[in-house]
Image (cartoon, grey):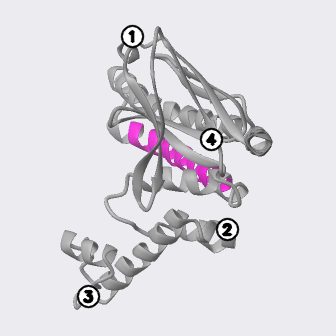
Amino acid sequence: MNRILYFLAVLAAFTSCAESYNIQGASSVSSLDGSKLYLKAIKDQKPQNIDSCEVVHGKFKFAGLLDTVMMVNLFMDDRSLMMPIVLETGDISVRIDDAQRKVSGTPLNDLLYDFIDQHNQLDNRMNELGHRESQMLLDGISEDEINEQLSVEAMRIAEEEDSLVTNFIVDNFDNVLGPGVFMMITAGFQYPVLTPQIEHIMSKATDTFKNDPYVREYYRTANEIQAHMQGMDEPAIPSEPSDSTIQNILNGKE
C-alpha cells in the first residue's frame, strides 16, 4: 500500500510540474453555439486533431498538457475559422465576434495578433483603393489619371506588406511564429514556388528555421519544381508544371 501511495505521489508531482495550456473562449456568433470546435496542427503535411470541445452558451474551453510549444488552427468540424493559436504555457483568451477575432493573454499569441492586426490594416488600405477608384470615376476623373495615382499607392502598400511579413518571419526564425507565418503566406499558392520574398527570407534563415518540417519540405519541393522548369526544352516560353509533374516531385519520383 505504501508503494502505491508513493507511486501516486510521484506521478502527481510530475503532472503538476508539466507545462500546460489553458484556453478560455467566448463567442457572440450564434451559429457557433452547440458546435464542436477542434484545435488542429500540421503534422506530416496533414492537419491532425490536438484537442476538441463544444461551444455552450457562447463559451468554450480547451486545456491539456504541453510537450512543446506549437501553432495550431481553430476549426469548426472540418471548416477552418482562420484563427491561428499558439499553444504555450499560460492562460489564453480567444474572442470570436462578427467584427473581430482575437487571441491574447500569452507572449507569442500577443505578438502574433499584433502582426495580424497590422496586416489587416494594410489589407483595409488596399481594399479602400477600390472604393476611391469608384468615387474618382463618379467625380469625372479620367481612367489614366486614376490608374497613375492609385497604382503608386498600391505599390507602396504592397511594399509595406512585404516588409512587414519578411521582418516578422526573420525576427521569429527560432520560435514557432516564423515557420507558422511562413506557412500562412505560402498556403495559398497552387504549388510551392520561389518568390523573391521567399528567396530573401531563406538567404537569412537560421538552421532552426530551415529544419522546420514544413519549411524544409516546401523549400525542397520549390527548388525541384524550379529546376524542372528550367530544364525544359523550351525555356523561352515559361509555363506552369503539370499536375502530374508536381505530384511526382512531391512523391520523390522526379
Please, what secondary structure does the residue beneath circle 4 have? strand
Crowd around label 1: few <14 · some 14–19 · many ≥20 (10 Å): few
Q: Which residue occupies the extreme top position in the image?
A: 57
Residue type, label 2: Thr
Task: Give the residues in magenta.
Answer: 146-167
35, above or below 190, in the image: above
Q: Position of residue 48 (x, y in %)?
A: 42, 49
Q: Which mark is residue 232?
A: 3
Q: Which residue is mark 1?
A: 30
Q: Which residue is mark 4?
A: 87
Q: Main secondary structure of the magenta part?
A: helix
Residues at marks 3 and 4 touching, judged by CB atoms closer than 8 Å: no
- Disc 1 or disc 4, which is closer to the eye? 4
Q: Residue at x 33, y 73 (%)?
A: 250
Q: CA distance from mark 1 to mark 3?
A: 54 Å
Q: Position of residue 240 (x, y in %)?
A: 25, 71
Name the image quarter holding the C terminus.
Answer: bottom left
